[in-house]
Image (cartoon, grey):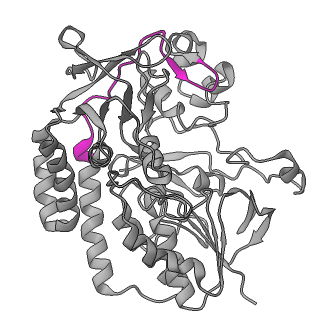
Amino acid sequence: MTDPVVIIGAGPAGLSCAAELAQAGREVVLIDDNPIAGGQYFRQLPTAYGTAPNARLLRDKTRFDELAKVLTLQGVRYLPSTIAWGMPDPRTIAYAGQAGSGRIRASNVVIATGAQEKSLPFPGWTLPGVISAGGCLNLAKAHGLVPNGRMVIAGNGPLVLVAAATMIAAGAQIEAVLEAQLDRKLVTSALRGLVASPKILATGLGYRARILQSGTPFKTGWMIAEARGKDCLQVVAIAPIGVDGRPVRKSQRWIQADTLVIGYGLLPGSETARVMGCRMELKSELNGVVPQRSAELETSVNGVYAIGDGAGIGGAEIGLMEGKIAANAILRRSSPASLKARYDRLDRYRRFLNLAYATSKPLIAATADTIICRCEEITLGRLAADPNSDGDNLNALKISSRLGMGRCQGRNCLHVASKLLGFDAEAQPAHPRARPPLRPVKLAQLAADKDAGAAREPDEITASE
C-alpha cells in the first residue's frame, strides 16, 4: 500500500494540491495549525458565527466553498488545529494537535506553510492598540470583530490596501492610510500587471478606489515614527521617509488614534523547509529566504515539495497554481501547457512587484530604547552593546543575548535585528538553525515520541545570483 502524501498547510496552495491529488485517487493527509481551512486569504467565520448586517467584510466565500470540497473527499484525512513540528526521519512527519499526536510516514511531503509578517519596531509599538495587519484581518474574517474608534493603517506592500479596504467595508473609522513606497515607483508595476494578470490588477485598483471613495487620506512615502499612550494607544506620529529610510522627525505629524494597524511586508514562512533539511537561498524578489526548487517545485530533499507563500511571496493565485503543478509532479504527469504559461507569466510579475515595493533603503524607526525582541524584552541599545553585534554570525548574537529564544523562536525579531545591526544577509549565511519542535507543543505529546530528531538544516543559506 502506498504511503499518503502529507501536505502541511491548508491555505490556497495546500487545498489546491490536495484536490488535484485526491481527484487522481491518491491518499492525502492535510495538516493545518488553524481550526478552519483556508489560510489567510480564504479565512472564514466559524459555522456558529454570523455577520452583522452592516459588516460587509471582503471575504471570498464562494471560491473557498469550492476549494473546501476536497476536505470531504474519500482518501483525504484532515487534521485541523494540528502542528507538524518536525521530520525526525526522512519523509516522516511528527505532529501534535487536538486529535492527539503521532508520526506519519509519507510517500511525498508538500510544504504549504504560507507567510509571516515583517516586524518594524518603533517607539511605542508594544502598546495595547497596536496590531499587525494580518492580526487585524484575522479578527475581522475569523471572528467578525472590527476595532472601535479611530484607526490608522500604515505599512509597505499590498497588504496595506487589503487591510484598509476591508476595514472600510466593515465600517471602521480610519483617520489615515500610509504606504511607505512612492506612487511613482508602483506605476510601472501596474502597467505590467495589466498584461500579466488583469484580474489581480483590477482587484488591487478596486481596493485603492474603495479607500479614495471613502475620503480617507492616503499618503505614499510616509511611515509611522512613534506611538504614545498611558495604558494604551492614544496618538501616533506619522512622518515622510527620508533618503536614509528613517522618518523625517521635523516634518512629523501627530494623529489621535485608538488602533494602529501596521503591515510592513511579508516574509516566506520557510522554517518548516529548513528543519526538513532543504537547501535554502536568499532571494529578494521572493521577499526572503526560500527553499531551492526545481521546475516541478521539488526541493533539494527528494520527494519534498514547497509551494505557496512559504516558498516565495506571491499571493493566492500563485499558490493555487503551484498546488496543481506540485500535484502533477507527484502524480508523474505533465502540467497543461496553459497552466505553465499562465504560471510563468504571473511568477515573473510577482517577482517584479515584490521588488517594486522594496524601498531604496531599509525602513528604520527604532531608537536605542525600542524593544526588538518582545519575548525576551531586549532593546536595540542592549543588542548594539553586545560584543557579538558587530560580528558576522547572528547565531552567536542569539546565544549571548537570548535574542530569538522566546516563544516565537526568532520569527518576529531575528530579521529585524539583522537589519538594524547591519548584518550582511548575503555574506552572513550562519542563521540560527530551525530546530524541532517548530511550535510549542505539550510535553506529554513530545514524551510520546522517542525523540525530536536531529537538526537537518544545511549549514548555509546561499545568496541568489
Residue 150 in view of the camera: yes
- Extreme front residue here? 53
Q: Is residue 453 above or below residue 295?
A: above
Horizontal relation, residue 445 to residue 407: left or right = right
Q: Is residue 334 above or below residue 435?
A: below
As for residue 365 lying within the magenta part, the answer is: yes
Closest to the observer, 358 or 464: 358
**Which residue is rendered at x = 36% and y = 65% of the image?**
60
Horizontal relation, residue 191 to residue 166: left or right = left
Q: Is residue 342 above or below residue 156?
A: below
Query: What span is colored magenta in the figure?
Result: 355-377
Closest to the observer, 445 or 135: 135
Could you say which quadrant of the image residue 388 lies in? top right
Could you say which quadrant of the image residue 191 lies in? bottom left
Pick the quarter of the image with the N terminus: bottom right
Q: Where residue 181 appears, x then y in whole percent?
A: 21, 36
As for residue 218 lying within the magenta part, the answer is: no
Count the marks: how many? 0
Residue 179 in view of the camera: no
**Which residue is rendered at x = 31% and y = 34% of the image?**
153
Q: Where residue 298 appears, x then y in whole percent?
A: 52, 70
Q: Where residue 244 appears, x then y in whole percent?
A: 25, 20
Q: Main secondary structure of the magenta part?
A: loop
Q: Where residue 289 appears, x then y in whole percent?
A: 47, 47
Q: Is residue 215 above or below residue 308?
A: above
